Amino acid sequence: MRVGIAGLGKMGGAIAARLMECGHDLIVWNRSADKAAGLADAGAKVASSPADLAAQADAIVTILTDAAALDAVYDGPSGLLSADVTGKLFIEMSTVQPATEIALAGKVRAKGAAFVECPVGGTTGPARQGKLFGFAGGTDVDVARAKPLLDQMCRRLEHVGEVGAGAGTKLAINLPLMIYWQALGEALAISRHLKIEPQRMLDILADTSGAPAAVKNRGPNIAAWLAGGDFGAVTFNLDDARKDIRTMIAQGKAVGVDLPLIEKTLACFDEASAAGYGQGDGSGLAVYWARRNKA
């Protein structure tokens, strides 16, 4: 299949590499053209604009930063929807509010194309291996059409409802983890006086009910960072986590739900970013808090 991908950040780039490995003819576009260089060397075609990408592809995948970026790529000059997209399939994978996806679906369908949203759980490693968790929203017919492609990206795909349900599910799934990084930092802070070596402490936590799967996976990296070493490859940075938290809070307001814990957590993330942790891994919130206010 000729698959176009607009948005080659960490996740978009990993998904693109996975789909090339699965044998698809790939067309890519990114606002910063340098991010397409490695994929071009591997055989992907680089489109000159979103419209050029949409004209060449049968299925178009978008995974972009926020609603403003979606608006620019879909509706801007030479945007995706300025091309003839009749009969094509759009798969939208960004982390945004449900209302954004619903409005975008209406625009895409008005152009005669199919639209499925499918934000995902997972980071760049699972993305590269096709082991993401997909939360699909759309009609039964459209999701069935997208499923063969999504199955190559995801270890598990859940059709959770109409367009908007996928975005809502993704925000709900990520919210406890964002709060957990602050909780972990506080746990490490109150145990600091025990002088337990970081690697051992994280190993103990990972073997208890006090740790989700993310700690079991990232514990050694967090321990290395706490001990003064390097975390390793950043899969999802702290500033991106702040963006997603703001989206969660906005969604809470949209549906009339109070979210006191995540609102307080955002303030903690903001403080860590101001202290220079913004471009480090999102789990760095725990590292910052464990080091904060040392006696």
Image: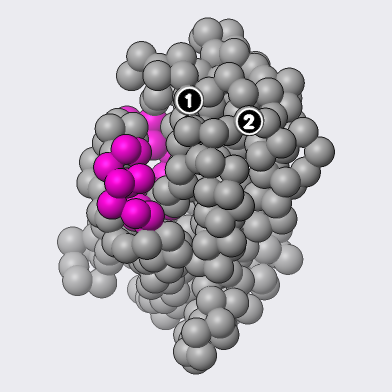
Q: How far apart are marks 2 and 1 (CA)?
A: 11 Å
Q: In this view, does 258 lie above or below 226?
A: below
Q: In which quarter of the image is residue 244?
A: bottom right
Which segment is the magenta one?
119-146
Side (left or right) of 242 relative to 135: right
- In-front residue for pair 232/76: 76
Query: Label 1, on which residue?
Result: 58
Asked whether residue 124 is drawn in magenta, I would say yes
Of circles 2 and 1, the one toward us is 2
Question: Do we see residue 141 in this rendering?
Answer: yes
Q: Is residue 195 above or below residue 74?
A: below
Residue 263, position as x, y percentages in the image: 56, 82
- In-front residue for pair 90/107: 107
Going by the numbered disc 2, the residue's amino acid type is Asp
Secondary structure beneath dot 2 equals: loop
Residue 268, position as x, y percentages in the image: 59, 76
- Residue 84 marker: 2
Going by the numbered disc 1, the residue's amino acid type is Asp
Secondary structure beneath dot 1 equals: loop
Crowding near the residue tagged with mark 1, few <14, some 14–19, many ≥20 C-alpha atoms within 10 Å:
some
Q: Residue at x 74, y 31 (%)?
A: 32
